[in-house]
Amino acid sequence: MIITALIIAISVITLFAVLGLVLVYMERKVAAFMQIRLGPMRVGPWGIAQTLADTVKLISKEDIIPNGADKFLFNLAPLMVTVIATLALAPLPFSDKWIIWDSNVGVFYVAAISSLTVISILTGGWASNNKYSLIGAMRSGAQIVSYELSVGLSLVAMVLLSGSLSFSDIVMTQQDAWWIFKGHLPAWIAFMVFIIASTAELNRNPFDLPEAESELTAGFHTEYSGMKFALFMLSEYINMFIVSAVAATLFLGGWMPLHFGQDNFFNHIMDYIPPLVWFAGKVFFIIFLIMWFRWTFPRLRIDQLLTLEWKYLLPISLINVLAAAWITVTGWHF
Amino acid sequence: MGTESLLVLFFAGLFFAGAALIVSALIHPTSKNPQKKEPYECGIQTIGTSKIQFKIGYYLFALIFLLFDVELIFLYPWAVAIKDFGVIAFIEMFIFLVILLLGLVYAWKKGALKWV
Amino acid sequence: MEQVQNIVSDRELQGSNLQTQEYFINVGPQHPSTHGVLHLKIKLDGEIIEDVDPILGYIHRSVEKMCEKLSYRQIIPITSRMDYLSAHINNQAVALAVEKAMAVEVPPRARAIRILMAELTRIGSHQLWWGVMGMDLGALTPFFWGFRDREMITEMFEETCGTRLTMNYIIPGGVATDVHPDFIGKVKNYIRHLRKKLPEYDEILTGNRIFIERTRGVGYLSPEEAVSFGCTGPTARGSGVSCDIRKWHSYDGYDKLDFNEVLFNEGDNLARYKVRIKEIWESLRIIEQVVENFPEGEVMGKMKKVIKLPKGEFYQRVETARGELGVYIVSDGGNTPYRIKFRSPNFSNLSVLKKIVVGSKIADMVATMSTLDLVIPDIDR
């Protein structure tokens, strides 16, 4: 019991550290290649140790708490955001055997936990006693909360099609084909809405208004320095991983290899690739998509951002839920 | 593992963040310069306080969100059970969602979705 | 807001302390989007700007006073440091003013080189602006693409002038030295390169839906206001005000070249954006024409060792990448100017900022400031 707990704790902390290092490195390389440059090249071959060096730098940086800041909340926010990101990892199936908490309400749990992130951002922004942070926090309040609806509704559409709230059950329903292939139009729409809305939930470009660099200098984390800032950044990347893992599991079959139909030659060949590789491949594909957005799109304005959600994505996803329900009831999907 | 794994994760996250902050606190330098602790406002002293009564437009969206989110929760159990109940569940939820959509249209027409 | 105020009736609101508090925020001098040490004191209601107050003087170097103690050749390096993105054109303005006063004939090859340098400067400046505009709107990739293409121009400058930013190459009487032997070939290559790359600019930014939404109808500047605030350059031409000095008061042989003045009538950020993009194309056309008939011969006219301007007042205007730069020299017959005054385009363009951003959001202000294309050392001098 305690041994299992320890194993889980150690592996999660390792996952945290490794994901942070890998994703930051990946972001810098993806950005670099889109911008016709090489990115980090000096520390280690192809600069692979660059993020490690950066971590050392961030740890040894001075920690500044500004005058007039609410010290308790100011320190609590980075802790909170990290803990929330860890908790959301629980029900994700990394492979057919690797799952921390095989819950029968996994989808619901992830939706609930990930919506807590906004509280830590609001806390950090408000406690900083800085007007830029305040505007950033307020923006994130309106933004994350709004886009949560679309995320939730596209999750509901997938729950309808698969008939389960458990991630491992949803993966098993994709044994004959991934939902993106057999879910018809509702799965497609849900996938696109999910990707757009979760990019907004992550505060990433084109929806990075809470930290809009050219307007608010650094938005809600303007006053954070050193390790506290690093925790904000790290949990942003962990959240990106979680969102991509959810998308990969619901739409692209999670760890399920690429299958078409039942028990044929093609499926057997695909089975030779281990599930963990399939999972990582899909997750990193979606992470790449989200990074691609960031480096090619300009930023929206706050009113356009809310218009997009309330006047386009929300009605679309409401109708999409109905369409998915109709398909499920009539059994039109394969 | 069961639900207790959440507790493990909670403490793992807390340990990770806490350890990072403590290690950082042990080795980072501290400046005694009082100006360093001034709130950053592009190098100029900030005018007035930052703890102000902020514009209500942001909270308004949170209010509408609350209405929709509460109703979204009802969709989850329905989504799981729809296969057992068939068309009747679909029709019931159709009515429910139409009311929800009407609410959205109402808020739209009232101008609650317009940013001011 | 209306519906909120309906719920809480006005009677209750008045006298209570429930109303939104307005607050001041300082944007700059250390801010990513002011591109220098411009300081804007903004009064905000939530995110809506109620008042903007530009505060200048952070990089004031008293250029004009300094020039009173310098000979006319020494003034040239000072002007390079005003609008550092149009250094060649600033130099050209002083050189032209001195030549006009002394009635010196500039050899045709020098004039051709001047046009080449000026137009390359304009392209480089617009490319840098294009990248920075993307960055202000949150897209970082255009910044690097713009700099990639500008870098080739800077390299060409470096070969000929020896410097990359503050050239001091165009001097009274002509240009300092002849161009590098590879220069013309490189310019020809560059035209070919840029004609291929400019459509890419449109693909990543101009054609983007978000970009158009962010700029169309934002920061409207009417032609009347543009004229009354003294706006020039692309800022005014975006409002349909024809003000290209190269057309109206031609200098250095621009009148013999075939090019169009780019005009758009919408007056918003998108129009100002389009003017600059089209100006790059027009500049390419000018460069092509000059390169095809590149004259041979001297690059320096007959100048005395010590330049002494006759007694009197002289004015010369040129079109920099940002608008009209005027040089007004009062001479008492000595070898230094009695008084010199630069009419910088950026100062007038900045003055219009308050007029067009009040009532819009912070994000719009950043976009508008970006399309005004401000260079702060030119405002403060």
Image (spheres, coloured by chain):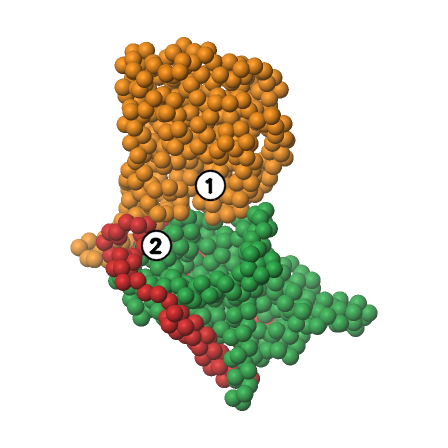
Q: Which chain is red?
A: B
**Looking at the picture, does residue C288 appear above or below residue B65?**
above
Q: Secondary structure at mark 1?
A: helix
**Looking at the picture, does residue B6 appear above or below residue C279?**
below
**Residue C148: percent from the left, percent from the top?**
56, 40
**Residue A195: percent from the left, percent from the top?**
56, 59
Residue visible at 30% across and 19% down in the picture: C337
The image quadrant that residue C258 belongs to is top right
The image quadrant that residue B25 belongs to is bottom left
Mark 2 neighbour class, 10 Å CA radius: few under 14, some 14 to 19, many 20 or more = many
**Looking at the picture, does residue C157 appear above or below residue B66?**
above
**Looking at the picture, does residue A277 appear above or below residue C283?**
below
Mark 1 neighbour class, 10 Å CA radius: few under 14, some 14 to 19, many 20 or more = many
Chain C image colour: orange
Q: Which chain is green?
A: A
CA distance separating discs 1 and 2:
21 Å
Please give the chain letter of the residue carrying mark 1.
C
Question: Of the residues shown, which amino acid type is indicated by label 1?
Answer: Met
Question: Of the residues shown, which amino acid type is indicated by label 2?
Answer: Tyr
Residue visible at 61% across and 63% down in the picture: A284
Please name whichever residue, C130 or C85, is drawn nearer the observer in this view of the structure: C85
Would you name the residue on which mark 1 appears? C133
Q: Residue furthest left?
A: C15
Residue visible at 51% across and 82% down in the picture: B5
Would you name the residue on which mark 2 appears? A132
Q: Residue furthest right?
A: A265
Q: Is residue C372 visible?
A: no
